[in-house]
Amino acid sequence: MTGLFFVYFALVSIAAGVMTVSLRHPVHCALSLLVLLMHVSGLFILLNAEFLWAVQVIVYVGAILVLYLFVLMLMNLKTDERYFHPSARYILGPAVLGAGYVLYLLLQSPFAGVKGDAPTTAVLQDGDTYAVGIKMFSDHLLQFEIVGIFLLGAIIGAIVLAKAPKPLDRGRERL
Amino acid sequence: MIPLSAYTAVSAILFMTGLLGVLIRRNFIIVLMSVEIMMNAANINLVAFSHYLDSMAGQLVALFIIAIAAGEAAVGLAIIIVVFRGKISTNVDEMNLLKW
């Protein structure tokens, strides 16, 4: 059953990713990005990461994608602009070959590693949100603060950039 | 039981798709969307390793990546609006304001 869901989420997310890159109309691209994000959140559920599932749906779909759609609607883009890069056909072949090689290596690799201290049974006992919270506010507190500072900088930068530029010396023109 | 390599394969395919989008698309907004696809591929990888290696650190890094993606989207779209206000185009080939 889990395998069936995995195949569904994986195939639909890959198809939606390809559509995001290849569709012509920007709003259609944004909507297939929506499909991609929802199905990636389904993959998170299969990996016992419920908190990340909620964050993915709320932050990615609810905030970031809506921001993209706002800007798309605001600018009213024409669809007849030049579509692909002129040298796209030189890029495409090596890219697909490289992806095939990487996939071959990935499917061969055993991925053995040192086990951590949060086995699935321990995570499921109190829930994923509890485990993430305990870990974040004990071992990863500095990263949390850095992300906070980063978001503050991003807010200020976005406001400064998007503000309408003030005319420099309007008072002097009257003279 | 799904093998870990299945998740990494999905992640690799998605990352390659996003990289191709950045390389071959000309619309700046769609280039940003392709960056989001790549970040999602990285998130799948992190969460899959976090699950299979019994560690919470991967999920935390994925959480921070989502926060950084939000900041990146805000600043990137602000830049697009500024460029679009000056000259009516979002084509990345025609943006050369910073070119000396």
Image (spheres, helix red, strand yellow):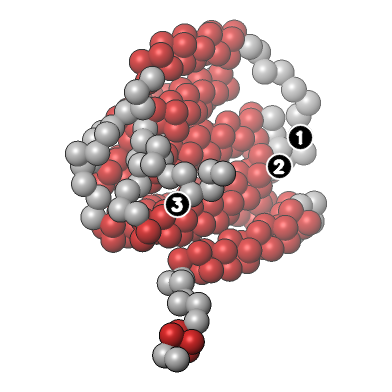
What is the distance, in whole Å, between disc 1 and disc 3 at their CAs? 28 Å
> Crowding near pointer 3: few (<14 within 10 Å), some, many (20+)?
many
Identify the mark nearer the N-term, 1 or 3: 3
Q: CA distance from mark 2 to mark 1?
A: 9 Å
Q: Secondary structure at mark 3?
A: helix
In depth, the one of B82 and A75 nearer the eye is: B82
Q: Is residue B25 above or below residue A30?
A: above
Q: Residue at x 63, y 66 (%)?
A: A152
Q: Could you tell me the amino acid type at mark 3?
A: Tyr
Task: Label 1: state its secondary structure.
Answer: loop
Please report contact status of discs 2 and 3: CB closer than 8 Å, yes or no. no
Percent across and percent down for residue A84 are: 32, 28
> Looking at the image, which residue is at 37% across and 20% down?
A88
Classed neighbour count for the residue bearing mark 1: other residues with Cα under 10 Å, few (<14), some (14–19), many (≥20): some
Taking the view exactly as shown, the residue that stands out farthest to the bottom is A175
Discs 2, 1: same chain: no
Label 3, on which residue? A60
Q: Position of residue A59 (x, y in %)?
A: 47, 56
Quarter of the rendering occupied by the C terminus of chain B: top right
Give amino acid for label 2.
Answer: Ala
Residue picked out by circle 2: B57
Residue A62: in sight, yes or no? no
* Disc 1 to disc 3: CB gap under 8 Å: no
Number of other residues with Cα within 10 Å of mark 2, as a class: few under 14, some 14 to 19, many 20 or more: many
| Secondary element at tag 2 | helix
Q: Are marks 2 and 1 in contact (CB under 8 Å)?
A: yes
Q: Is residue B15 visible?
A: yes
Amino acid carrying mark 1 in the image: Gly
Q: Nearer the viewer, mark 2 or mark 3?
A: 3
Disc 1 with disc 3 on a shared chain: yes
Name the residue tied to disc 1. Answer: A116
